[in-house]
Amino acid sequence: MAFNEMFLADGKVRFPYKKVETWLKSLGPSDIERALRECEARFRRQGITFAVYGDNKASERIIPFDIVPRVFAAQEWRRLSSGIEQRVRAMNAFLHDLYHRQEILRAGRIPTDVIIQNDAFVPEMVGVNPTKGIYAHIMGIDIVRVAENDFYVLEDNCRTPSGVSYMLEDREAMMHLFPELFSQHRIAPVENYPSVLHKTLESVAPASSGSEPVIVVLTPGIHNSAFFEHAFLADEMGVELCEGSDLFVSDGWLYMRTTQEPKRVDVVYRRIDDAYLDPLAFRPESNLGVPGIFDVYRAGRVTLVNAPGTGVADDKSIYTYMPEIIEFYTGEKPLLKNVTTWRCSNASDLKYVSEHLAELVVKEVHGSGGYGMLVGPTSTKAQVEEFRVKLLARPSNYIAQPTLALSAVPTFVNSGVAPRHVDLRPFVLSGDQIRVTPGGLTRVALQEGSLVVNSSQGGGTKDTWVLED
């Protein structure tokens, strides 16, 4: 049975939710209907949408928002934050090592071919020294809860993690719709995230940038599924939103085109994948990036956030080695658990997975967004057999994990209030220091029994509260 974050086994309410329960009892059907209607209108008005690739029915959708907040006590959050910080420190040390001395490979803690043959490893980054030695400046760590004190990291996101705009808008919507509920709690703020992000980006600017570094957000354009977030963050930080054609390299420096004279750029928060970043260094057919930007980066004249090549650290095949990575670089045992994971590239693991497909969750090593995965217990026999063919054809493309009993939080559904499974993506910024945003994005599986929380698969979001002492 799934752990219910609001109710104890005897039906009593857990302390962080005491006032939320009283508030819920005070709401009538008309209050709920009004709130949901206002919230949807608000999101539509502000253009808070996402695109689903390959969906012909609608190019833009609104992520369903649930008005029951998810609440963490201060002590719970301190424990989580410590584990997250440890993981982020280890990951940046790991990335620096991979692109320099490769001591963890020499020590035999990770097989060399797992790194060198990994599609996310960027050989061109070998020997490059990012400002302050930081590769992953912005990370999202996906965490699930299975019991009172049992939290697991499901996966790491350190390429271009998305979702922070939904976290901010969910908070603003709750404050607007239910100010009386906020007045009854001391909730750690998240609305300062854009200013903290701006401060983080300034802190990793090259030494040549001066006292006021010029920062831009680089987007692939309006057809990207997360374009709203790109525009939102640029606007909130007060910096320019640029496409590749808005930037150019001249005399070894990066410039932005303006209505007056070109302006030199110091920091690029890029939401473009490595392969499309620079057609002179990577994919020559790319029209999204900036020709020559990688040479400027290697010369230390611009900072790219996140650094090229960070994707090797959040690859699902690397995830299985995270406990060893944390211990190797910090000398500490991991504070947050990894989920038991079978590497299908290993013959004995593949045999076990193939024999237990109907019980497991199987994911593509490079997959994201809930695509290309099998949730065995909720799949038909035909779906399992169809997936088995793909698995056996390319076993190294998959990892498998047990089906966890994700914790549940009361959620408004058509039939009323019912528990639904959730996960959590806290956002972490690394610059002059590591900052974990208190709360993060809670994603909720709105279908009864579903464990897939991704918006592209029908999931919704909740506001996430961290109570202050």
Image (spheres, rainbow, N blue to C red):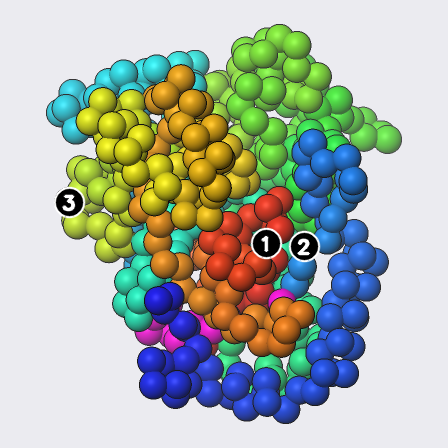
Is disc 3 placed on a helix, strand or loop? loop
The N terminus - image quarter: bottom left
Question: Residue drawn 28% across and 62% down?
Answer: 150
Is disc 1 placed on a helix, strand or loop? loop
Decide if residue 342 is on the left or right side of residue 46. Answer: left
**Which of the two discs, 2 and 1, labels the residue nearer the N terminus?**
2
Q: Nearer the viewer, residue 270 or 32?
A: 32
Task: Give residue 417's quadrant in the image.
Answer: bottom right
The answer to whether 310 is drawn above or below residue 91 in the figure is above
Q: Position of residue 146 (x, y in %)?
A: 33, 62
Q: Position of residue 388 (x, y in %)?
A: 40, 27
The answer to whether 98 is drawn above or below residue 413 in the figure is above
Which residue position holds label 3? 331
Tag 3 and tag 1, C-beta contact below 8 Å: no
- What is the span of residues highlighted in magenta in the rendered image? 66-77
Question: Residue drawn 49% across and 35% down?
Answer: 383
Task: Give residue 230's quadrant in the image.
Answer: top right
Tag 2 and tag 1, C-beta contact below 8 Å: yes
- Going by the numbered disc 1, the residue's amino acid type is Gly
Decide if residue 419 is on the left or right side of residue 45. Answer: left
Which residue position holds label 2? 63
Q: Which of pointers 3 and 1 indicates the residue nearer the eye?
A: 1
Give the CA distance from mark 3 to mark 1.
Answer: 38 Å
Is disc 2 placed on a helix, strand or loop? loop
Which residue position holds label 1? 459
The answer to whether 450 is drawn above or below residue 457 in the figure is below
